Amino acid sequence: MSIFTAPAFDSHELVTFGRDEATGLRAIIAVHSTALGPAVGGCRMFPYATEDEALHDVLRLSRGMTYKSALAGLPFGGGKSVIIGDPRKDKTPALMYAMGEFVHSQGGRYVAAEDSGTGVADIRLMAERTPFVSGMDDNEFGGDPSPSTAWGVFISIRAAVKHRLGQSDTKGIRVALQGLGHVGYYLAKFLVEDGAQVIAADVNQANVDRAVADLGITAVDPGVILTQEADVFSPCAMGAVLNAQSIGQLRVGIVAGAANNQLATETDGAQLKDRGILYCPDFLINAGGIIDVHHQRIGSADTVKRAHIDHIEETLAQVLQQADATHRETNLIAESLAEEILKSARDRALAA
Ligand code: NAD
């Protein structure tokens, strides 16, 4: 992969590679921007087929974190890290210690938190080697920010339903949910409690069984979740699910989910718009987790944290209104809003 010309590079401040022979660690840390503060972002562990794939992923995720934190009004920049490996087979305490040392070597410019393939226990191991970690303090969910992410996505679905269908709750709304992991499970719970009808799929049967038993959702095969006829499609598994092929198959009016980088390419936002599908930008609506991490760091009361997460709804409403008024794609409007916030921060820094 050529780095400097890659669209995902987008003037990253730092991209660094970590290798530890003894533990088998192969990791990349990407810091897109520290204009608003240290780059806080998840540490993902995934069995990437190639190093290029890992690099592409970390660059896109890191840039998304810059926008996410800016729109959420957080004093954080944007960064991310990836560990190349299968979390079910390759993850050991020694590997997480080595990752902690790699994070520490960046001197606090990057602060790691949990992500797909890592959890609170892994972050606690890293914390034995570096103070530059977050998202492991006790909160009402034992430190896991995923329920907060799920709440932010839930209120965003509700806001999108209101915007599109004029209904102020999700009662009777059909939601096709892809992925019943840390976020998807809680999102299904909030939806079911609000009266929505949840049809869901996961490649991990244990996660399906748990959601069916606890919440009474309807399970379908992972291969057909994307083509379900529903009001909302909610991607909560992996990125790049919205591409030239899949967008043509969607049978929903709204897409709103937790997964990062749902659009395979920037132009896929235009495709969704052309099909009349209302897309709620992922980096705007899945910010609940990073907001939770921030409030864990500063020791806020749960009510303060919840009020901050609830603000996502207002920002989304602003984006949807601007999209209606300007006929532009929602993802581009959300990016422009974030860029304005970053520009103001840079201007303030220059003036100081
Ligand atoms: P997770 O790994 O706990 O859950 C993902 C689930 O998706 C797993 O149960 C997995 O089996 C399932 N899955 C994988 N491939 C699938 C497929 N093809 N079809 C159906 N299911 C599939 O991860 P998570 O923490 O729940 O996060 C979900 C998504 O949201 C990720 O993209 C993550 O980056 C993003 N996200 C998470 C948070 C958070 O707070 N955890 C915050 C922001 C964004």
Image: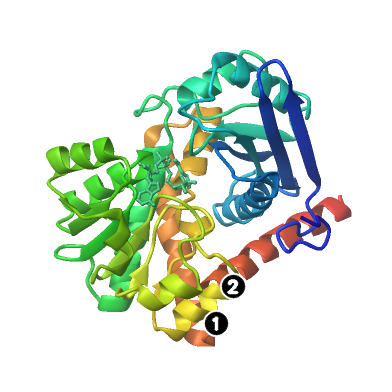
Residue 65 falls left or right of residue 189: right
Q: Secondary structure at mark 1?
A: loop
Residue type at mark 1 is Arg
> Extreme front residue here?
49
Q: Secondary structure at mark 2?
A: helix
Q: Quadrant of residue 90?
A: top right
Ligand 1 sits in quadrant: top left
Q: Residues within 10 Å of mark 2 (few under 14, many from 20)?
A: some
Which quarter of the image is occupied by the N terminus? bottom right
Q: Residues within 10 Å of mark 1 (few under 14, many from 20)?
A: some
What percent of the width, then of the height, locates residue 53? Answer: 64, 50
Contact flag, marks 1 and 2 (Cβ < 8 Å): yes
Residue that label 2 marks: 332
Residue, x 39% and y 83% (percent of image)? 276
Residue, x 47% and y 31% (percent of image)? 300
Total numbered badges shown on the rendered structure: 2
Q: Nearer the viewer, residue 303 or 198?
A: 198
What percent of the width, then of the height, locates residue 317? Answer: 43, 69
Residue type at mark 2 is Leu
Residue 136 falls left or right of residue 34: left
The alpha-carbon separation of the residues under discs 1 and 2 comes to 7 Å
Residue that label 1 marks: 328
Asked if residue 139 is positioned above or below residue 223 in the image, the reply reads above
What percent of the width, then of the height, locates residue 331? Answer: 54, 70
- The answer, for residue 38, to whether it is visible in the render is no
What percent of the width, then of the height, locates residue 337? Answer: 61, 67
Residue, x 28% and y 62% (percent of image)? 224
Q: How is the image coloured?
A: rainbow
Residue, x 21% and y 55% (percent of image)? 220
